[in-house]
């Protein structure tokens, strides 16, 4: 009796050979980027992913997303005064993130 992994591999192989995979939306295109995932420290990725799949995104994940958005806005901004204000907000946000992650590490609450 084939294992589950072998059965999955067989289905994927058959789909690839029949051309079924080429009909999938997004075939041949890069996966969408998730700035929150990339910014999440490795040791928190799996627990955060499980929580997200369960319908609950930890506040830290949203903070990572905000940090990525702020960094992109700073890059795109042409106004020096706006850049300074956004850099201040980014520094505050980074400090909050660092404090929350350190508390999670110390308390091992994940």
Image (cartoon, helix red, strand yellow):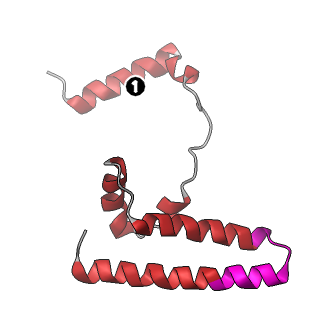
Residue 63: horizontal and vertical position, in percent? 50, 69
Residue 79 drawn in magenta: yes
- At x 30% / y 77%, what residue is drawn? 104
Give neighbour class at mark 1: few <14, some 14-19, many 20+ (Cα, 10 Å).
some
> Looking at the image, which is closer to me, 52 or 35?
52
Residue 30: horizontal and vertical position, in percent? 60, 43
* Quarter where residue 60 is shown: bottom left
Residue 15: horizontal and vertical position, in percent? 44, 19
- At x 76% / y 80%, what residue is drawn? 83
In the image, 56: left or right of 89?
left
Residue at mark 1: 12
- At x 80% / y 72%, what residue is drawn? 77
Question: The C terminus is located in which quarter?
Answer: bottom left
Residue 1: horizontal and vertical position, in percent? 13, 21
Query: Which residue ends up furthest to the left in the rendered image?
Result: 1
Magenta residues span 75-88
Q: Which element is circle 1 on?
A: helix
Query: Which residue ends up furthest to the top in the rendered image?
Result: 18
């Amino acid at each position: 009796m084939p294992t589950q992994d072998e059965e999955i591999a067989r289905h994927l192989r058959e789909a690839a050979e029949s051309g079924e995979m080429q009909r999938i939306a997004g075939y041949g295109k890069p996966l969408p980027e998730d700035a929150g995932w990339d910014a999440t420290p490795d040791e928190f990725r799996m627990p955060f992913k499980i929580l997200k799949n369960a319908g609950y995104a930890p506040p830290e994940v949203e903070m990572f997303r905000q940090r990525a958005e702020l960094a992109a806005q700073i890059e795109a901004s042409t106004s020096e005064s706006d850049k300074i204000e956004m850099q201040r907000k980014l520094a505050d946000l980074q400090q909050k993130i660092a404090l929350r992650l350190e508390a999670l590490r110390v308390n091992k609450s994940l």
